């Protein structure tokens, strides 16, 4: 296993809070011997402006270039809204992207073709929403507030039985949102301005839980058996898994007896 080094840039506002939780995950995988990752910290955005009066320093840029990866939490704070463009927190991200020759955001996405009729791209492929509705995953997507109400019939048809959160950012601190059941969704009188974020909950289809632990689960249990209680291990493994707690308990007890 080759060692990797990450430069972590917590940024400003909620960024440091997010970073604290991410580090717990990194440490867990390192302690479990599943990864060998070292990390160090740098400043960007408002945090860098507070210290150096620059949204990112040359030293941070060079450290980013030498790292195997850069983990960025967030940049953007109203504290510097009135700054010149080059002294806004977000400008640090633009400088970083240019310095590392990165110009494209690639994210795992689905194109909601049923919504394309309401955009400049004309198409009517309802199959995408129907296909997604058969998955038990949660979905997050974005739509213009002007077009959202047109999409409601398609959402109700394909995601009946799920919960939905509809949110429009008003400022960096305030949002207006509606949390309801998809089946109860009705015309929303949002101001026709800005982008709306839609979060649709996962669906549970009542599948029976598998009674078998896979090898990756067993390796995690092996590494944690002397660090956590059996109850804590069962809770950890059972999150998002289709493994019965009884099977987890039995495997843990077996390990305990062998030691």
Image (cartoon, grey):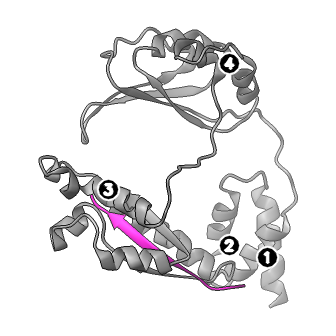
Which residue appears farthest toward the left when viewing the image? 82
Q: Secondary structure at mark 3?
A: loop
- The vertical placement of 78 against 157, above or below, is below
Q: Are marks 4 and 3 in contact (CB under 8 Å)?
A: no
Local packing at callout 3 (Cα closer than 10 Å; few below 14, some 14-19, many 20+) is many
* Marks 4/2: CA–CA distance: 40 Å
* Residue where numbered disc 4 is placed: 158
Question: Sequence order check: which comes first, mark 4 or mark 2?
Answer: 4
Query: Position of 36 compared to 42: left or right?
Result: right
Q: Secondary structure at mark 4?
A: helix
* Marks 2/1: CA–CA distance: 8 Å
Of residues 99 and 234, which is closer to you in this image? 99
- Residue 76, how many percent across, how many down? 27, 52
For the point 87% across and 59% down, the residue is 212
- The vertical placement of 173 against 88, above or below, is above
For the point 67% across and 79% down, the residue is 224
Res 159 visible: no
* Residue where numbered disc 3 is placed: 75
* Residue where numbered disc 2 is placed: 230
Image quarter (top left, top right, bottom left or bottom right) of the C terminus: bottom right
* Marks 1/3: CA–CA distance: 47 Å
Query: In the drawing, what numbered circle is on residue 210?
Result: none
Which residue appears farthest toward the bottom when viewing the image? 259
Res 118 visible: yes
Magenta range:
1-14
Residue 9 shown in magenta:
yes
* Residue where numbered disc 1 is placed: 253
């Amino acid at each position: 296993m080759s060692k990797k080094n990450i430069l972590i840039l917590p940024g400003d506002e909620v960024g440091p809070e997010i970073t604290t939780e991410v580090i717990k995950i990194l440490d867990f995988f390192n302690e479990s011997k599943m990864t060998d990752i070292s990390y160090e910290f740098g400043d960007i955005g408002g945090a860098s402006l507070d210290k150096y009066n620059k949204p990112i320093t040359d030293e941070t840029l060079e450290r980013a270039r030498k790292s195997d990866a850069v983990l960025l939490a967030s940049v953007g704070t109203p504290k510097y809204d009135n700054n010149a463009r080059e002294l806004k927190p977000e400008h640090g991200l633009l400088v970083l992207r240019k310095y590392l020759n990165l110009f494209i955001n690639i994210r795992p996405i689905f194109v909601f073709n049923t919504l394309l009729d309401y955009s400049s791209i004309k198409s009517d492929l309802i199959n995408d929403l129907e296909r997604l509705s058969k998955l038990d995953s949660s979905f997050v997507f974005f739509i213009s507030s002007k077009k959202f109400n047109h999409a409601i019939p398609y959402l109700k048809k394909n995601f009946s039985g799920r919960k939905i959160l509809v949110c429009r950012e008003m400022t960096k601190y305030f949002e207006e949102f509606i949390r309801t059941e998809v089946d109860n969704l009705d015309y929303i009188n949002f101001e026709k301005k800005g982008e709306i974020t839609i979060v649709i909950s996962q669906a549970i289809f009542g599948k029976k839980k598998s009674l078998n632990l896979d090898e990756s689960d067993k390796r995690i249990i092996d590494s944690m058996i002397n660090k956590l209680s059996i109850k804590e291990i069962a809770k950890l493994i059972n999150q998002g898994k289709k493994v019965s707690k009884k099977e987890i308990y039995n495997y843990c007890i077996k390990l305990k007896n062998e030691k």
